[in-house]
């Protein structure tokens, strides 16, 4: 318990937040870097994964591709992928640019599977009867996608973004081994100095950031959930799967 309290004292020590502190401090600079790496990677991954997931979920084409791709990508070793890309881009880019480009691409690759699965599964979860009704009312395929499927699938889509963002936040921590910034620099510098307060303090900062972001996404999922949608669909499935009810005698 004393070890934990000592790490908290290190976090709230004003000297560790003062500009001009020795590397890897101040803490706010490392926090901003961590958020920048995460935001850029998640946005790029979303621009790639969401349109592809919407196409697959709307048309039904490429289901096996999604299953195989997401399973294979999630099995990639994070640190190995990071160092591989650093070596590849180190031949063509400068010493300062190669780590940023290589790390960003590795974060994007790791974020795509969760977003792709969330977008695809979200559109697949929309009741087919609702889509058929929209099509019968004369809506185009693009209108069905943007006005029916995506709004109803938003909780699952946000769930995919949530999982991808949390994975990137955790992975950015190891980017310090490639010479990049972020909260991971606090941890690695603490390991080099045998400063256990700094090590645990950095770990607590990463945990707090992940919990905060996770809470915001959870709130967004709750706010975008359509009342009655999740309760109606299972009931509709049960009605279609059961045999017709026997006719009862009618009284004249």
Image (tube, grey):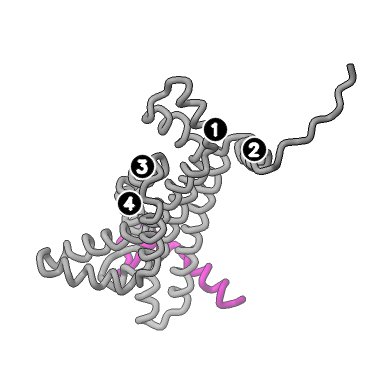
Residue at image location 35% in from the left, 69% down from the top:
76
Quarter of the image with the N terminus is bottom right
75 w.r.t. 53: above or below: below
Q: How far apart are marks 3 and 2 (CA)?
A: 25 Å
Furthest residue toward top:
252
Residue at image location 17% in from the left, 62% down from the top:
97
Q: Distance between the residues labelled 4 and 1?
A: 31 Å
Element under disc 3: helix
Counting from the top left corner in percent of width and height, residue 128 is at: 52, 36
Q: Quadrant of residue 25?
A: bottom left
Q: Distance between the residues labelled 2 and 4?
A: 35 Å
Element under disc 2: helix
Furthest residue toward bottom:
194
Q: Residues within 10 Å of mark 3 (few under 14, many from 20)?
A: some
The residue pinned by badge 1 equals 129
Residue at image location 60% in from the left, 36% down from the top:
229
Element under disc 4: helix
Q: Nearer the viewer, residue 153 or 252?
A: 252
Q: Does the stretch in magenta take in 193?
A: no
Q: How crowded is mark 2: few (under 14 residues within 10 Å), some or many (20 or more)?
A: few
The residue pinned by badge 3 equals 55
Asked if disc 2 and disc 1 are in contact, CB closer than 8 Å, the reply is yes
Please say whether residue 18 is visible from this viewpoint: no
Please say whether residue 131 is visible from this viewpoint: yes
């Amino acid at each position: 318990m004393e070890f934990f309290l000592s790490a908290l004292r290190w976090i709230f020590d004003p000297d560790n937040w003062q500009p001009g502190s020795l590397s890897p401090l101040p803490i706010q600079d490392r926090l901003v870097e961590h958020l920048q790496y995460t935001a850029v990677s998640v946005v790029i991954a979303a621009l790639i994964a969401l349109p592809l997931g919407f196409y697959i979920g709307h048309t039904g084409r490429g289901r096996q591709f999604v299953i195989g791709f997401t399973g294979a990508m999630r099995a990639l070793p994070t640190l190995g992928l990071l160092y591989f890309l650093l070596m590849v881009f180190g031949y063509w880019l400068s010493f300062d640019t190669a780590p940023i480009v290589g790390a960003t691409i590795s974060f994007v690759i790791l974020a795509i599977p969760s977003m792709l699965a969330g977008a695809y599964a979200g559109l697949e979860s929309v009741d087919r009867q609702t889509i058929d009704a929209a099509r019968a009312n004369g809506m185009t395929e693009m209108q069905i996608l943007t006005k029916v499927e995506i709004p109803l699938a938003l909780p699952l889509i946000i769930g995919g973004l949530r999982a991808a963002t949390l994975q990137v936040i955790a992975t950015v921590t190891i980017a310090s081994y490639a010479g990049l910034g972020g909260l991971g620099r606090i941890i690695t510098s603490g390991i080099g100095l045998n400063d256990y307060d700094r090590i645990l303090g950095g770990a607590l900062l990463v945990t707090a950031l992940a919990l905060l972001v996770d809470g915001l996404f959870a709130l967004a999922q709750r706010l975008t959930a359509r009342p009655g949608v999740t309760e109606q669909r299972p009931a509709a499935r049960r009605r279609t799967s059961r045999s017709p009810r026997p006719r009862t005698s009618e009284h004249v």
